Amino acid sequence: MKERLKNNYIRFARISLVLVYLVILAGAVVRMTGSGMGCPDWPKCFGYLIPPTEESQLEWAPGRTFREGQVIIREESLLLARAEFTTGEAFDPANWEPYTRHDYAVFNAFHTWTEYINRLLGALAGLAILIMALSSLAWWREARGKVLFAWLTVIAIGFQGWLGATVVYSVLAPVRITLHMMMAMVLLGMLLWIVFRNQQPAGNQVGDRLTFRLWVLTVAVSLLQIILGTQVRQYVDGQADILGYGARDLWLADPTWVFYVHRSFSILVLLLHLWVAWRIRKLRLGFDKVLPTLLILFLIIASGMAMAYLDFPWGSQPVHLVLASVLFGFQWFLLLEMYRAARARISS
């Protein structure tokens, strides 16, 4: 039983990692389709565990039973049922209270179900992480650090869920979206650490102190580039709200200085990656993950150029975001491999 739990700990760490990436992908689809407010409340969706498929389900009607907390749209406002009741022939305001978190009251079935699937994947990721943490208890006597870190990951996914709620309550405030995304990166890093700690090292990897230090610098610069990118995205979101989605050619007509720094910084990020890749190949260090990392970086640069010079082609923004999260995953895992190889070389 104990060995089975230990195996489940590793298995569900990997499952959780895949699910978190799926959540990021789903979030990108939500963003691409403009479905962020498809569910205007949280954690339910229009007061339902399974959201409505037709607008008529959100309309008041005589002789209809409503449960407490169930939502209707009336006169362009959200109303919540105060308690379970059955409607009479006339609308009675005493049975309803206004939704006070925000004043967004629009139903679009496609947007609702797109956002709902995003939330469902988030819930599955949370469940997988919880199972991982429960399974980690089998390690308590041997490695309490594993147990504590697993439960810290549970806290992290809970905090991420709370951040998701604040995004909805703020009606997609750009700053909240940025914090939500950055927390997803932290969560990825935590899960990758767990997977890494339970994976056997590759026999052909050789530690090199200078290469490791260069890669630390590369990852740090890349994280700074991501932060700059979030500032550019916030600016673009503001321009989209002001000018509308039909004026994509004007979103970067007068960009802030952050855009120019972000654009130029990509050259430094690329050169650092190429330098490290060259050293790995020349010294035969055996860190093969640098090749897919380079490929992903090239795709990120291409999608960024498409947004800047081709007026934000459909899907370019979410693709850019998802690729950035995948790049971070490869960078972080490669950093952990280099660190382990460097320590093994020092101790030998």
Image (tube, rainbow, N blue to C red):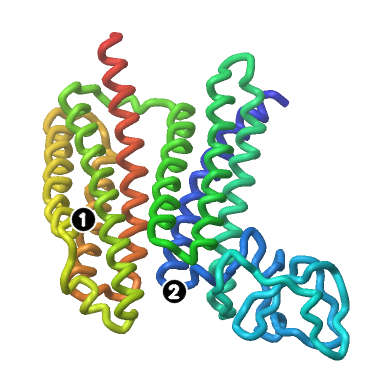
Position in image of residue 6 (x %, y %): 62, 27
Query: Quarter of the image containing the C terminus?
Result: top left
Between residue 32 and residue 99, name the one nearer to us. 99
Determine the residue located farthest toward the bottom in the rendered image: 89
Q: In percent of the image, x 85 and y 69: which residue is there?
A: 84
Q: Residue at x 81, y 82 (%)?
A: 92
In the image, 163: left or right of 274?
right
Position of 205 compared to 305: left or right? right
Q: Which residue is mark 1?
A: 298
- Quadrant housing residue 95: bottom right
Check disc 2 and give the amino acid type. Thr
Crowd band around label 1 with a 10 angstrom C-alpha radius: few (<14), some (14–19), many (20+) = some
Residue of label 2: 33
SS for callout 2: helix
Q: Nearer the viewer, residue 58 or 304?
A: 58
Q: Quadrant of residue 205?
A: top left
